[in-house]
């Protein structure tokens, strides 16, 4: 099957080589569709705070953001089902029409989120409908990546496959960048109070326009040449899903694709972009528009890294960049985020170092879902919850009586703190502010902002190393007749569960530990296991098509 990605078939059954113009159109249309579809998915994360206020209102700030991330995770949880469904259709009916369906479903579901009345008007129905639309988004995204990646890969010459498919990876970042651009423009055009009240819905409505553009571009495309050749030769799979699990050698390849490739790339990606967004905006209290501008600059520059890595992988193989990026991530993620915190809010970081916060008492564990399930939170747990929501690190000492101290000086615990969350937050923050903690919205100086951008670019490079060549690698790992299913299933299980649940799991770890950096341990654990699997299972040497390394 060497070089089959360059073979097209005419109506008469004769081979036709795709022209350079055809390949450019394939890359442009596939990349644009991927940008728009990931924009639809990421706009939810970009506007997490306002979505929480509209659909998941709670007097508990930690619970509210966890419910938003739970909704985010639900969409990812349904990606594997979308991968099975659309992978089957892609292998049976064709690559082109399958991802026409996925982009349509995504656009309609995203626009729908912007039309739902808030919980203040329709109550519990609001979050239920949002979750339903997130499920549709997850199903659509489960079919999108495999279709776009395979479509480009099967048009590419083997020696350029990493380079051409790297635009798909860059387009995923492009979707995130586009979501930030749209939010920034909407904030500039709409007054702040109006944006919080209704203007945040505009980016969701824009999805209909993006859907129309994407459909127009993709309708101009022809079917994948490899699919045409298989159809002409009568080599279609009768049951792609079943054959993906039973084809000789495929179980190992699926295991490697799930843990050694997707698990690594997806946790690094979401840590680099979504976790950093939440960390700067919520934990470090940096001005929201400043955070968006920082992520915009870092994201735009980072897009080029994916193309560079993809092209590099055509010469050195797919394994080398992935292993380098994963090992560097294990070594650098904690230092990068520590440095980012020091630059973003030096007052908070310095005060935490010079005036350590100590809580003593019994039952000193937090239950972030206590309010949701009407469980009783202990008095000590309430204090810890408030400190965590304020981005303050603390240590706990078991004792019979509850007390709070800062730098060795005791802080009086007011009686009203027991039942009034706002009074507790205001009281704790006022006491800590007197000791040098700064809870105001931060506007870091320019030099600090440049430092944060540089750190985010380092995260972007780690992501590019582990992601830039992946579309080419996954395409090369599996036989053509079951390729859509075989690569989509492990990719979306890994991205859906290991990556999609990252904000929720990391948030719970932070809420339970009180350490705003503790959520990074989840990424470290997944990447650490993935390094072992990747070293064992990814083929060495120059890129090879499926038939050459079976």
Image (cartoon, rainbow, N blue to C red):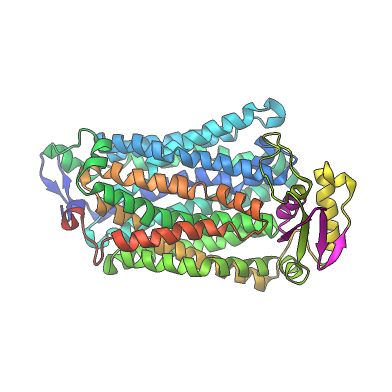
Q: Position of residue 234 (x, y in %)?
A: 13, 36
Residue 163 is a magenta residue: no
Q: Give the magenta range.
A: 383-411
Q: Nearer the viewer, residue 546 or 40?
A: 546
Q: Residue at x 65, y 28 (%)?
A: 124
Q: Position of residue 230 (x, y in %)?
A: 16, 41
Residue 384 is a magenta residue: yes
Q: Position of residue 388 (x, y in %)?
A: 71, 54
Tally of marks: 0
| In the image, residue 171 above or below residue 242 | below
Q: Position of residue 357 (x, y in %)?
A: 77, 63
| In the image, residue 46 above or below residue 116 | below
Q: Residue at x 69, y 50 (%)?
A: 365
Q: Quadrant of residue 339?
A: bottom right
Q: Nearer the viewer, residue 48 or 216?
A: 48
In the image, farthest residue toward the front:
400
């Amino acid at each position: 099957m060497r070089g089959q990605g360059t073979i097209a078939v005419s109506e008469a059954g004769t081979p036709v080589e795709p022209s350079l113009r055809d390949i450019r159109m394939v890359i442009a249309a596939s990349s644009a569709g991927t940008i728009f579809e990931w924009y639809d998915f990421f706009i939810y994360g970009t506007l997490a705070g306002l979505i929480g206020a509209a659909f998941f209102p709670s007097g508990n700030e930690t619970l509210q953001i966890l419910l938003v991330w739970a909704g985010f995770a639900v969409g990812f949880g349904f990606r594997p089902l979308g991968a099975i469904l659309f992978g089957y259709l892609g292998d049976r009916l064709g690559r082109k029409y399958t991802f026409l369906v996925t982009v349509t479903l995504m656009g309609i579901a995203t626009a729908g989120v912007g039309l739902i009345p808030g919980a203040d008007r329709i109550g519990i129905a609001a979050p239920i409908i949002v979750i339903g639309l997130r499920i549709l988004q997850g199903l659509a995204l489960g079919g999108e990546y495999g279709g776009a990646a395979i479509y480009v890969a099967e048009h590419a010459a083997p020696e350029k496959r990493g380079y051409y498919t790297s635009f798909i990876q860059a387009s995923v970042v492009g979707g995130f960048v586009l979501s930030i651009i749209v939010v920034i423009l909407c904030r500039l055009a709409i007054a702040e109070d109006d944006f919080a009240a209704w203007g945040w819905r505009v980016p969701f409505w824009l999805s209909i326009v993006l859907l129309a553009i994407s459909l127009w571009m993709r309708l101009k495309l022809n079917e994948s040449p490899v699919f045409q050749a298989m159809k002409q030769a009568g080599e279609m799979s009768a049951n792609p899903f079943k054959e993906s699990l039973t084809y000789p050698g495929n179980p190992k390849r699926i295991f490697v694709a799930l843990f050694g490739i997707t698990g690594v790339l997806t946790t690094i990606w979401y840590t680099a972009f979504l976790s950093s967004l939440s960390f700067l905006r919520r934990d470090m209290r940096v001005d929201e528009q400043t955070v968006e501008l920082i992520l915009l600059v870092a994201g735009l520059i980072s897009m080029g890294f994916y193309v560079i890595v993809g092209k590099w992988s055509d010469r050195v193989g797919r394994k080398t960049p992935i292993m380098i990026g994963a090992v560097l991530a294990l070594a650098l993620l904690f230092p990068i985020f520590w440095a980012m915190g020091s630059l973003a809010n030096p007052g908070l970081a310095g005060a935490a170092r010079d005036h350590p916060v100590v809580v003593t008492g019994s039952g000193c564990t937090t239950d972030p879902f206590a309010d949701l399930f009407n469980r009783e939170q202990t008095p000590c747990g309430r204090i810890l919850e408030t400190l965590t929501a304020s981005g303050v690190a603390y240590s706990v000492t078991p004792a019979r009586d509850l007390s709070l101290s800062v730098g060795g000086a005791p802080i009086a615990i007011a009686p009203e703190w027991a039942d009034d969350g706002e009074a507790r937050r205001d009281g704790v923050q006022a006491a800590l502010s007197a000791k040098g903690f700064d809870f105001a919205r931060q506007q870091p100086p320019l030099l600090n902002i440049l430092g944060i951008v540089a750190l985010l670019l380092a995260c972007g490079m780690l992501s590019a190393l582990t992601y830039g060549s992946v579309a080419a690698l996954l395409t090369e790992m599996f036989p053509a007749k079951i390729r859509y299913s075989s690569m989509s299933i492990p990719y979306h299980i890994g991205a859906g569960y290991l990556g999609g649940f990252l904000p929720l799991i990391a948030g719970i770890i932070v809420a339970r530990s009180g350490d705003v950096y503790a959520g990074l341990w989840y990424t470290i654990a997944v990447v650490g296991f993935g390094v072992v699997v990747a070293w064992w299972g990814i083929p060495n040497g120059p890129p090879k098509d499926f038939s050459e390394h079976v």
